[in-house]
Every structure is written in C-alpha cells, then in structure tokens.
Image: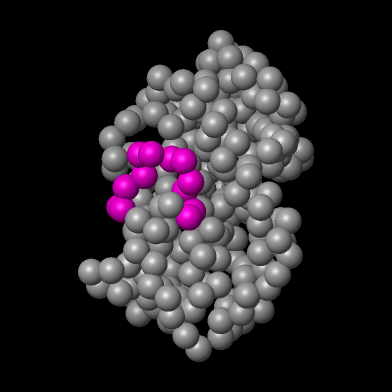
Amino acid sequence: MLPVTARVLVADDDPKHAQLIRLYLEREGHQVMTVGDGRAALDVARSRRPDLIVLDVMMPLVDGLDVCRILRAESNVAILLVTARSSENDMLLGLDIGADDYLAKPVSPRELTARVRALLRRVRAGEEQSSIVRVGDLEVDTGRFEVRVSGEPVALTAKEFGILELLAREPGRVFTRGQIIDKTFGFEHDVSERTVDAHVVNLRRKIEANPAEPKYVQTVYGRGYRMAEQ
C-alpha cells in the first residue's frame, strides 16, 4: 500500500523535539511546517490549512488545549495531541476537547509516525468512498467527510466521524465497544472502552438535540451502541 502523504503542522516549543518529529515525518514524504507557540499554530493552521496537526499541550501564548478547542470549532482537521501528562483522565480531556489521538511524552518517533499514518488513512479512506448515508434528519457524507443535522453542518473529529459512519451504515445493528475499537481505531493497542464512551459523549453533544435522550446514537446496556432505525 502506498503511503498517505499530507501537509502536517508540528506545534512544539522545544526546537529539538520539533525538528526530530519533522525529520521523521519528512522521511514519510509529508510536507512539514513547524511553529513554536500556540498563537503561531492558530495562524498557520488557518492560513495553510494542514491535513493534520501534531500539537504539543504545553506551549507559550496559547496552550495546546486551547488551540485544539479553537480549531475544532472551526474545522475537521486531524489533531494529534502530545503531552507530558500521561494519566487516563488527561487523555480523556484531550479527546473531550476534540483531539483525534493522544500520545504521552517521551514520544517514540516511530510510534508517532505510525499514528499519523493511521489517522491520515482513515481520513483519506472516507474521502475516497463517495456516498451519503441518511438516518432521519441525520446525513453522513462519507466522501466529503461532512455531517449535517436537519441540513445544518456539524464539525466532527476523525474518530467521531468514524464511529458515526460505522453505526449509520447499519441502523439497528448493535456494535460492541470492542468492535468499534477494531473497526475505527485500527492498530492502536492502548484504546480502552472508556475512550470509546468519551467519543460517543462528544458525538452526541454535537448531533443530538438532547444528548441525555439520544435520538440517533443509542446505548444498548450491557452490549454497546447502535444507530436508531428511522
């Protein structure tokens, strides 16, 4: 399989670490831009429109979490957070604000490039399969990586979109959390069922009129999740 190459923005205030990541990503064929603070990350992300951002959490001017929140409200760009914080709660916080993936320092450059590769392939796979899935007022355009509810666009992360697409293609079918991990997260070996739940919570906030009483993504207690049949 040919590698997926893309425009990647690396935002890290440690020049040596940023340069190391850049070298590894350029070996993969990516076009890499680097910045050293959160304000510059926002400016470059808006002007250059990268396909993916490797985003350090601890940065001057604007920290990485705030950069992630701001960009997620504006676009579906894939975001990989990198941070010295390594607890599960920190990971879930990163996912909660819209990151697609999360790596704790010290980062293995080989693992980082593998995560980047997997994220890009998931995004590009959706772009290559042009079809629209409709469930009630919910419309999932897998070719354009777009979601609309009652005609209004909704911005999702790559993983939120992957989960939604999986469920929407087979309304009524129950997918266990393990099946969702296998089909949506691929090779990632450290994904927990709580991670799936966190993504579903975020997804419901965006597509449901009342997330506490979901109309689309329903919980089947003791089993997993399904898309409602409508």
Magenta stretch encompasses residue 112:
no
| Residue occupying the far bottom of the picture | 230
Image coordinates of residue 199 in percent, x first then y, are 42, 57
In the image, 125 versus 24, the foreground residue is 125
Q: Magenta segment range?
A: 183-194
Q: In the image, residue 60 lies at what x, y percent? A: 51, 25
Whether residue 224 sits left or right of residue 161 in the image: it is left
- Residue at 68% x, 73% y: name it: 132
Asked if residue 101 is positioned above or below residue 213 in the image, the reply reads: above
Relative to 32, say whether 95 is above or below.
below
Instruction: Tell me the residue at 46%/21% (across/down).
Output: 108
Kindly tell me whether residue 32 is visible in this rendering: no
The image's colouring method is: one colour
Residue 208, image x, y percentages: 46, 75
Q: Is residue 69 visible?
A: yes
Q: Residue at x 52, y 22 (%)?
A: 110
